[in-house]
Amino acid sequence: MNKWTVLVLTAFVSLSQVLAQDLPLPTKTAEKVDCEKLLVEYRELYKRSPQRMYYVKLYDCLLELKDYKEAVNLAEAQIRRTNEPEGVYMVDVAFAKSKMGDRKAEEKILNRVLESINKYPQYAYQIGQALSDKGYFEAALRLYEIAEKINPSFNFSYQKSLLYADLGQLEKMYDTYIEILERSPSMAYTVKNLISRAMAPDGGEDNLDYIIQKLRARALNQKNPVMTDVLTHIYIEKKDYVSALEFLKEWHQKSNYGAVGEIYELSNQALTNKQYELAITGFEWVTLHTSNANYTMRANLSRQLALTLKALNTPTDSETVAAVVTESEKLIQIQGINFNTLPLAEATARLMAFKANQKDKALDLIESLVKVPGQNPNEKARLLITKGDIYLSMKEFMLAIVAYARAEEVADNELMKDDAKFARAKAIYYSGDVPWALEIFEILQESTSKPISNDATAYASKILLNSGGDTTYEAMTYYAHADMFYYVGEYQKAHKILDYVIQTYTNHPIQDDAYLLKAKTFEAQGLFQQAVQWYEKVYTVFGYELLADQAIYQAAVLFEEKLNEPSKAKDLYELIVMQFTDSYLHNQARLRLRALLNKQSS
């Protein structure tokens, strides 16, 4: 046995001792009772044809029944009966021996497995996979290294990267990813997927800074487009569009490849994720760095779309809104109404209706868009939903309901139909016809769209919980009208109705909802101190009831982001984390708390 082979055995055997107690089997085993029933059948199948498929089923069943001695006998018999590499089945022998508590035999067999690769390196992949499947990660890693040393043409970088991941050795895992990219650039797609899977989904530490630095250095120093592609992918996955843009600009300057296409796509990604300023900057950069007329046209339209959506979805003064609308109209007039200008025209119509007080003009624009030939049914349905939204903002409930119904009729897939149906239900609810709205919300609880199903359930629950046995839904109808005024931005009218509800229906279950909507209305007005006071009333006056977690979370966000009181925000996030473990806001509060604590400690 090679001296350097022996040195690693204690490490991987000790790991296997830990893993062997609770190690999941390589395939999904049957329940014990099923194994007892199927054992005879599996024995007979294996006796007739000792194929690996029947062997695995029989071996797994024996392990499930804790008949480890018979599992050893089976694996040893398979070695004699098959032409496959004996190391694959010696791993099964070692694993069964570990289950019997015979660590000395386990270690001896694993040594034999590693030693066999010196003679048969061509079997490294099959045996390495067998070791990995049984949790012998260190042994599998060493086996691949032995095989590569014997035959330098072997490349097990991919398999080793997976093993480093299993062992939690992130830096070595990332080093191996880079090795894969250098040796096999065509595997960039695979590496990007592996990195995406390695990213911490809950904001935890994933050590990405390490690979980012490595990729950046190789991309810029070696002018390597593959490294550039993977690094840009990481930035986008992290939604770090600023770093991505800065890097691509530097790449464009230092390499001979250019980055116009990459920056255009990055800007589109940022726009999709509502990073409007970054998108605007990126599209402007494209227009200044390309001579391609098509790119220039698309970048100009996209830049104006970003400006329009920013004005629509963020606080914007009326003068800026008017200027954006004017510029959008000019661009649409120059380019004409077509598939390229459709997104900008629709966003402009919404900006006209909701921010520029040009509702009739907005409706005319939507009508012209609906008539564009060649649209697929779902695009037309989306435009009809926008038309309904505009009518709803005008409090033209029946016209809104008709537009939504038409959208539902036109749409050719269930998700779009449910979007339209949900919009129609909300319009009916805002109009005060609570029983009719409830019927539709209850139907939509079965929607295949999880967001729509959840929202419909929330509305249905709100109506049922707040009916208070009142079949006329009197209090709920007043609340729905207040909710409508909040939706269309007529906040003083919303406050007036909510004050009436709070003062009139003093013992009604609608009270906490009215308090919460008061808080949301103050927040929408930018009156954050008043909003916090009303959020606090929700969970102090009514205790930790149904709406408490929402009120606590929103108050915490305002303390953190608007009122510059991080200590109060921290206390409220901690309250959700400790007291509301079943809340859908629990994970968000935990992540915000972690970020806040990290910021305070830095």
Image: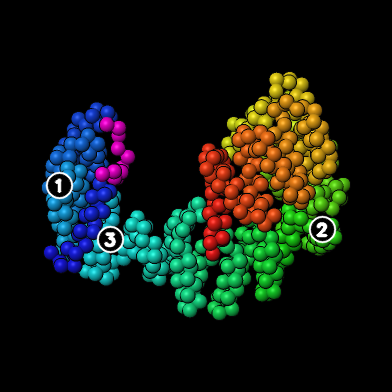
Residue 278: horizontal and vertical position, in percent?
A: 66, 64
Residue 403: horizontal and vertical position, in percent?
A: 77, 38
Residue 141: assigned label: 3
Q: Magenta stretch containing residue 29, yes or no?
A: yes
Nearer the N terminus, badge 3 or badge 2?
Answer: 3
Helix, strand or loop at disc 1? Answer: loop
User: Which residue shows up at 60% across the image and 71% down it?
Assistant: 246
Residue 582 vs residue 209, the one in the foreground: 582
User: Which residue shows up at 23% across the image and 50% down it?
Assistant: 17
Question: What stretch of residues is rendered in magenta?
Answer: 21-32
Viewer-nearest of labels 3 and 2? Answer: 2
Specify whether residue 326 is in view: no
Disc 2 marks a residue whose amino acid type is Asp
Residue 317: assigned label: 2
Residue 312: horizontal and vertical position, in percent?
A: 76, 54
Above or below residue 146? Residue 134 is above
Helix, strand or loop at disc 3? Answer: helix
Viewer-nearest of labels 3 and 1? Answer: 1
Disc 3 marks a residue whose amino acid type is Leu
Nearer the N terminus, badge 1 or badge 2?
Answer: 1
> Residue 7 vs residue 424: left or right?
left
Identify the residue position indicated by label 1 in the image: 102
Disc 1 marks a residue whose amino acid type is Asp
Above or below residue 499? Residue 202 is below
- In space, the residues marked 3 and 2 are separated at their CA atoms by 62 Å
